[in-house]
Amino acid sequence: MLSMTLTQQLELIQTATSVEAIAPALQALVEESRLECLGDRPPFVLTAMIQRLKHPRGAIVERVSDALEQLGSDAVVPLLRAFEDCQDQGIQARLVQILAKIGDERALGLFVDLVGAEIANHCQGNVRRIAARGLGKILRSHPSPTQHQGAINRLIWAVQNPEDWALRYAAALSLAEIATDDTIQALKTVLQQEQEHPGSSGCDPIVQQRIERLLLA
């Protein structure tokens, strides 16, 4: 059970109106969350911190996000569970952003699914682009052609997707980060198609210029 001190710290964050007021409480909650993980206890504090992503003040949500990111791999499973249980697309986007910054391989399956998902609005499109960048961070650290070919193929599909130039841009950045023979060849192929068919459906000068710079780097 949470002690009164921890409960009060959580309540302080929930009712806070300024970032300055929550800094000591957040640090104490991060330390307690680490102790939970070390002691193999249920992540009560960590789960309560994730709930604070619903705070109405954006600056406070940013600080809570930073604290969750600071927990790194310890936060991954609770964040994934929170995503599964969440119906709010704005909070889903925040959860995916935190997971993408952590870059843990356990988020790989979620990111692959999100990149390939159909979208109905801008928020869903933003989630898809964040997931594409998350794949780049994960796979640049663990580029295994046998284990991760499905994820690489999803990024290759995304960079060829004519419907969303911003997704193509994000996928191009991630493919360049992964930097295997397959991903570099995919970028070269896309660039060649863009150059051979300028102005055709799906071609975008911003994406083309970015791929050119990536290949020169």
Image (tube, rainbow, N blue to C red):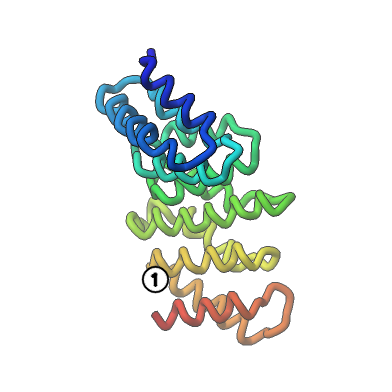
| Residue 81 visible in image | no
Name the one closer to the observer, 203 or 77. Answer: 77
- Identified at 57% across, 83% down, the residue is 192
Instruction: Please tell me how many numbered marks the rendered image carries.
Output: 1
**What amino acid type is highlighted by mark number 1?**
Asp
Q: Position of residue 19 (x, y in %)?
A: 47, 42
Name the one closer to the observer, 203 or 189. Answer: 203
User: In which quadrant of the rendered view does residue 141 lie?
Assistant: bottom left
- Left-right relation of 112 to 72: right
- Identified at 38% across, 22% down, the residue is 6
Q: Where is residue 178 in the image (x, y as percent from the top left)?
A: 39, 64
Q: Position of residue 103 (x, y in %)?
A: 39, 50
- Identified at 48% across, 67% down, the residue is 173
Name the one closer to the observer, 134 or 35. Answer: 35
Q: Mark 1 points at which residue?
A: 181
Mark 1 closeness class: few <14, some 14–19, many ≥20 residues within 10 Å: few
Q: In which quarter of the image is the C terminus?
A: bottom left
